[in-house]
Amino acid sequence: DRFVGLDFLELRAREAHELNPWMNTIVGDAGSLPLPAGHFDLVYQSTMLSSVLQAERRERIFREIGRVLVRGGLSLSFDTRYPNPWNPHTRPLRAGGFRRAFPGWPIKVWSTTAIPQLQRALAPLSLAACRLLEGVPFLRSHLLVLARKI
């Protein structure tokens, strides 16, 4: 399997495969992956971990990421770094959480994506203003985290 998509919901996994027929999709729990150990060069997650509110469940997910990666494999995460006042069912991620989850792994962290609500308000008025917002570090609402398994 070169590309495997995982979703907790069967409907979402099926939709993902329909949109990306080249990708195998499976239904499962990220805290107990139905995948072999040391099998993947890259594990990517996008805005999923912030929806996992229980610390112990997040820890299981991090352990599973480490388990399925080959030595030298990469974990790439894109997720929120600030609380979302419109969605109380999320908890942002911090760089320290990744460092604790992957002790000793080389980790790089970038802030990215200007606050979407500001971008949506400004976009009809000025794309240049949107680009300026992206240049202001504290207005970047997401983190991109790259960790390499040692």
Image: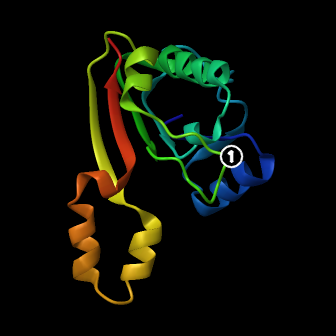
x and y, in percent, of residue 122 in the image? 37, 81
Amino acid carrying label 1: it is: His
Which residue lies at the image location 43% right of the left edge and 80% below the top edge? 121
Q: Is residue 121 above or below residue 1?
A: below
Taking the image as shown, residue 18 lies to the left or right of residue 125, namely right
Taking the image as shown, residue 73 lies to the left or right of residue 59, namely left
Query: Which residue reaches farthest bottom?
Result: 125
x and y, in percent, of residue 105 in the image? 31, 15
x and y, in percent, of residue 110 in the image? 27, 42
Mark 1 crowdedness (10 Å alpha carbons): few <14, some 14-19, many ≥20: few
Callout count:
1
Of 87 and 20, the residue lying toward us:
87
Viewport quadrant of the C terminus: top left
Query: Which residue reaches farthest right?
Result: 10
Viewport quadrant of the N terminus: top right
Taking the image as shown, residue 128 lies to the left or right of residue 32, namely left
Q: Is residue 149 above or below residue 45?
A: above
Of 138 and 37, the residue lying toward us:
138
Write down the residue under mark 1: 89
Q: Is residue 51 above or below residue 96?
A: below
Image quadrant of residue 24?
top right
Of 83 and 78, the residue lying toward us:
83
x and y, in percent, of residue 128 in the image? 22, 80
Classify mark 1: helix, strand or loop.
Answer: loop
Taking the image as shown, residue 33 lies to the left or right of residue 77, namely right
Which residue lies at the image location 65% right of the left edge and 18% below the top edge? 56
Which residue lies at the image location 37% right of the left edge and 82% below the top edge? 123
Which residue lies at the image location 37% right of the left edge and 43% below the top edge? 143
